[in-house]
Amino acid sequence: MNQKANNFQLMRELSLYQQAAIAATLMERMLPNYQLFAEVSEFGDSKLLRNILDLCWEWLTVKKVKINFERLAQELELVTPEVNHFDMFGVYPAVDCATALDMMLNGICQLDAAEFLNVAKISQATVARLIEYNTVDEDITTEAELKKIVREDPLMCYEMECLAELIALVTPMTVIGREQMQSLKAWVKEQGLTNLAMELPQNPSSAS
């Protein structure tokens, strides 16, 4: 728990654009969760989410670029699934992905770094939900016991380690430009896994 709190505090100490870069990088690890759900359920629009995330990177790397993020948020809402309409676990990480991307858009529109921090919190909440889902048949009697299981699970430890590594990677970046974007995307590819430890697509379509 201390590492999680420390990560968030370290992230708060960074600049708005540094925090946005971390959030966009975390979105790269979450987007395949939505893509898989859309493929299996035949609901949603993975290309739209990919395009929105590419435009977020564009905002980061091309200062003064004019993008209608309010309209994109409206389009995103239309392809965000309703949990009670789908009888599959995959709807939850898909909703989390869309919600995090919406917070990313809010952060950009309002220039509110707290929304970028929320992206990191949602990513960890997605991981926690999967761990809890996998322990449903275990004999857990208290909420404290469940929290301990979630906190100590290797997947949650990996998520927190990734955020710590990402913060360390972004901290020296005084400017977020094309070169920094490529470096952060390369880091995601090097990890090779989504936040739920699913292998990343080999050739994901994305603007570079």
Image (cartoon, rainbow, N blue to C red):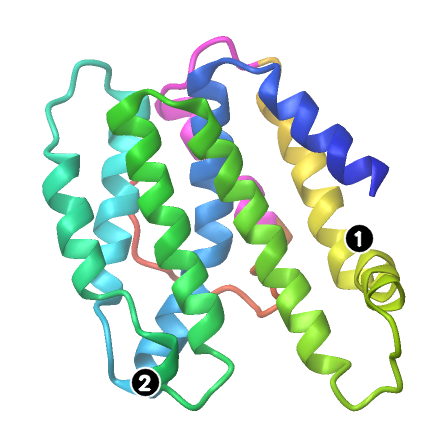
Residue 131 at x, y percent in the picture: 72, 71
Q: Position of residue 10 (x, y in %)?
A: 68, 22
**Quarter of the image where one finds residue 48:** bottom left
Query: Residue 29 vs residue 111: left or right?
Result: right
Magenta region includes residue 127: no
> Quarter holding the N terminus?
top right
Q: Judge whether 7 appears above or below 141 on screen.
A: above
Q: Position of residue 174 (x, y in %)?
A: 50, 8
In space, the residues marked 1 and 2 are separated at their CA atoms by: 32 Å
Considering depth in this image, is 153 or 65 the residue closer to the camera? 153
Nearer-the-camera pick, 99 or 37 = 99
Kindly indicate the quadrant of the structure image that contains residue 33.
Answer: bottom left
Residue occupying image coordinates x 47% and y 78%: 90
Amino acid type for the residue under numbered disc 1: Cys
Vertical comparison of 174 with 41: above or below? above
Secondary element at tag 1: helix
Specify which label sits upstream in the sequence, 1 or 2.
2
The amino acid at mark 2 is His
What residue is disc 1 on?
A: 157
User: On the rendered structure, is 61 left or right of 115?
Assistant: left
Residue found at x 48% / y 67%? 93
- Give the residue at x 49% y 20%: 18
Read off the magenta span: 173-190
Using the image, determine if residue 127 lies above or below residue 162: below
Q: Nearer the viewer, mark 1 or mark 2?
A: 2
Judging depth in this view, the residue of 89 and 190 nearest the camera is: 89
List the residue tagged with mark 2.
Answer: 85
